[in-house]
Image (spheres, rainbow, N blue to C red):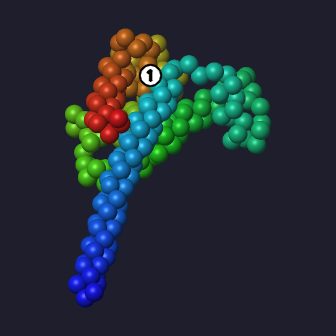
Amino acid sequence: MKYFNVVMDCLSTGTSLGTLILIWLGLKTWKIQLKGESKFKLSLDALRELKLTLIAIDDYRNPFYPADEIYDAYSKRNNGKILDLNDNIERKLADNYAEIDRWNKIIEKYLIFEDIMSRLSILIDDYEIDLINAKRLKDFLIDIRHNRIKKEYADKREEELDNASTEERIKYRKEHEEENLKINNVLFQYTKENDPWRINLEHYFMEFNKRLRKYIK
């Protein structure tokens, strides 16, 4: 009877230990699975938000602004007032508002992307996964921002030519032709076939997509 009790105690201890091991292995497997699912979801979300940011950039660089977009941009800043197209000052303000709205949409999408990327980088312990050819998405946006400022100064210079002679205007525009071309190449997309700035951004997306594919299976 004594030996039987000893054997039963050993079996009970062994069973408890085995149960604990199984629980530990189960938790470990669950954590690994959960981490894998988190990588999958964050990677998928990152690619999605990057693509949406690129779409917003394409919209911004499209030089065509529908009338409804211009009217809405003006109206929401003027308590529902309807834009008077015959008023040059109002029309200029409306055009500027529409451009700002497009820019704000880019920033809105970018901030969502950045939030996802910060969590993904921590999870996979890789803080350079979105650094491609020494550039991040932020660098493309900085490029747009700098050229927006340059265009603002260029537009003011053009306004100063209103009272200048024809010869002065031709000379001035010739001197700034190359500078204005560089600005327009960043801010505007006229053709997809000849758009180096957009091609670089597309390359960024494709390389980023390749890096995240191992987490999306």
Q: Position of residue 217 (x, y in %)?
A: 35, 35
Residue 203 appears in view: yes
Asked if residue 216 lies left or right of residue 60, the reply is left
Kind of residue at badge 1:
Phe
Image position, residue 185 (x, y; %): 37, 21
Q: Looking at the image, which residue is at 35% across and 25% down?
A: 202
Quarter occupied by the N terminus: bottom left
Q: Position of residue 151 (x, y in %)?
A: 43, 30
Q: Is residue 167 above or below residue 149?
A: above
Residue tagged by mark 1? 188
Taking 215 as reference, is 95 above or below it?
A: above
Give the residue displayed 44% in from the left and 31% down from the top.
51
Can you name the residue that lies furthest to the front here?
1
Q: Secondary structure at mark 1?
A: loop
Neighbor class of circle 1 (other Cα within 10 Å; few <14, some 14-19, many 20+) is many
Residue at position x 51%, y 26% in the image: 59
